[in-house]
């Protein structure tokens, strides 16, 4: 039997976007940082990260691979829905994609965002982008953002396996005593405080996932590894507090404390973004090397079939909700499955309110 996806007639993959060649880097950074008060030195530094990789971010290729895997997964389940892709900051831009969807006669799409957690940058800003993408477009489809999925088993299980694999890559004599450093993107303290319906959700959701992964690793290895949530990719003006500690400072601290080895688990990123290949694989691993601290980096979810299948699960779950049916919402750990529509006060825009889709009162 073909699963019922009505009222949806398309899926839209929504992502950040990244440059693909050196000439793209400056215009991309301008798109990302317009009106956001990022110091010039920081922009030049981040530009260098991209130039160091030939001006090409890995994110678009990751999304192309994800699209292919998702189309295959849906087809394998007998679901015949077109899958579109649009970005916030680079081609294919969301607005162009929405115009194409309108031309193709799409009426309503379920939107999967490549960001699993609450916060202005990782949730509401995408909802604003979706509003902007359809605003004034004749015949534009209705766009529904799928719920946050940091605690969906299809995201959690690959993180557990990746942690076990990265532990196994450490020299045997340091493995049992290894520390697990769960890494995510730093954001301003105030952005964390405003995240989610009750505030503090960004850190709380990461902490919940971290706790679950540590426990599942213990079930496999018999070891309850010491662990901490740490941050990378801080930007913004130096006098504004952002979430700490930075992963490099954390590695220094661990080394000073005599910790024998560390696994970095990048739970903040769904695939190998620039933050992963530069901030962790290039910079943080160099820090560990300099310290003589054995360190490995766990894989991101990427196109793990369980993660790809989670999109299908979220799509079918939401479709059933929209049809007024009862659903079982997959979720693991101490957070319940997240809401379908965000509260009006959730994750406020630090620069003042702007219209956004997928909101309770919308
Ligand atoms: C929470 C969060 C996520 C995770 C959720 C999600 O995935 O969306 C994320 C993802 C990403 N961030 C990315 C790149 C950048 N982020 C920047 C700047 C900023 N990020 C912020 C937060 C986040 N960012 C914030 C609060 C700023 C300050 C400016 C502002 O308030 O907006 C800047 C400007 C330079 C700098 O200062 O670093 C760049 C270049 C890329 C592409 C990577 C690639 O190319 O592979 C991705 C996936
Ligand atoms: Fe960012």
Image: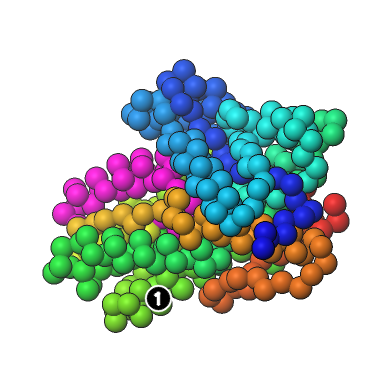
The kind of secondary structure element at disc 1 is helix
- The answer to which of 274 and 216 lies nearer the viewer is 216
Residue that lies at the very extreme toward the left in this rendered image: 173
At x 36%, y 65%, the residue is 161
At x 71%, y 71%, the residue is 327
Judged left or right of residue 362, residue 258 is: left
* Picture coordinates of residue 15, whole percent (x, y): 58, 41
Q: Is residue 277 magenta?
A: yes
How many other residues sit within 10 Å of disc 1, few (<14), some (14-19) or many (≥20)?
A: many
Q: Which residue is mark 1?
A: 216
Q: Is residue 201 magenta?
A: no
> Quadrant of the rendered structure where residue 67 is?
top right
Judged left or right of residue 183, residue 200 is: right
> Quadrant of the rendered structure where residue 77 is?
bottom right
| Mark 1 Cβ and ligand 1 under 8 Å apart | no
At x 53%, y 28%, the residue is 29
At x 61%, y 62%, the residue is 313
In the rendered picture of this protein, how many numbered marks are placed on residues? 1
Q: Which residues are magenta?
A: 266-293
> Is residue 161 in view from this perspective?
yes
* Picture coordinates of residue 270, whole percent (x, y): 48, 51
Residue that lies at the very extreme toward the top in this rendered image: 23
* Picture coordinates of residue 47, whole percent (x, y): 43, 28
> Is residue 356 in view from this perspective?
no
Judged left or right of residue 250, residue 72 is: right
């Amino acid at each position: 039997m073909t699963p019922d996806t009505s009222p949806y007639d398309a899926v839209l993959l929504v992502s950040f976007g990244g440059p693909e060649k050196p000439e793209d880097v400056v215009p991309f950074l301008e798109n990302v940082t317009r009106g956001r008060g990022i110091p010039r030195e920081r922009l030049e530094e981040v530009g260098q990260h991209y130039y160091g990789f030939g001006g090409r971010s890995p994110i678009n290729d990751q999304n192309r691979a994800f699209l292919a895997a998702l189309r295959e997964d849906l087809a394998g389940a007998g679901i015949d829905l077109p899958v579109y892709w649009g970005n916030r900051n680079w081609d294919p831009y969301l607005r162009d994609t929405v115009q194409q969807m309108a031309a193709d006669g799409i009426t309503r799409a379920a939107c999967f965002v490549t960001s699993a957690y609450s916060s202005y940058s990782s949730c509401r800003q995408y909802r604003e982008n979706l509003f902007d993408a359809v605003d004034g477009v004749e015949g534009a489809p209705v766009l529904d953002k799928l719920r946050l999925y940091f605690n969906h088993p299809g995201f959690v299980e690959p993180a557990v396996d990746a942690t076990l694999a990265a532990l196994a890559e450490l020299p045997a004599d340091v493995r049992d005593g290894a520390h697990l450093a769960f890494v995510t993107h730093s954001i301003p303290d105030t952005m964390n405080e405003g995240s989610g319906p009750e505030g503090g959700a960004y850190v709380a959701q990461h902490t919940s996932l971290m706790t679950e992964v540590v426990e599942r690793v213990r079930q496999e290895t018999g070891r309850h590894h010491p662990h901490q949530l740490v941050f990378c990719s801080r930007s913004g003006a130096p006098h504004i507090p952002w979430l700490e500690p930075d992963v490099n400072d954390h590695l220094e601290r661990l080394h000073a404390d005599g910790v024998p080895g560390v696994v970095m688990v990048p739970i903040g990123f769904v695939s190998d973004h620039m933050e992963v290949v530069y901030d962790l694989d290039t910079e943080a691993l160099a820090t560990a090397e300099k310290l003589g601290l054995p360190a490995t980096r766990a894989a991101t979810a990427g196109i793990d079939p369980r993660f790809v299948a989670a999109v299908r699960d979220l799509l079918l779950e939401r479709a059933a909700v929209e049809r007024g049916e009862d659903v079982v919402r997959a979720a693991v750990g101490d957070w319940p499955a997240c809401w379908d529509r965000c509260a009006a006060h959730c994750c406020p825009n630090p620069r003042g309110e702007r219209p956004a889709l997928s909101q309770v009162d919308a």
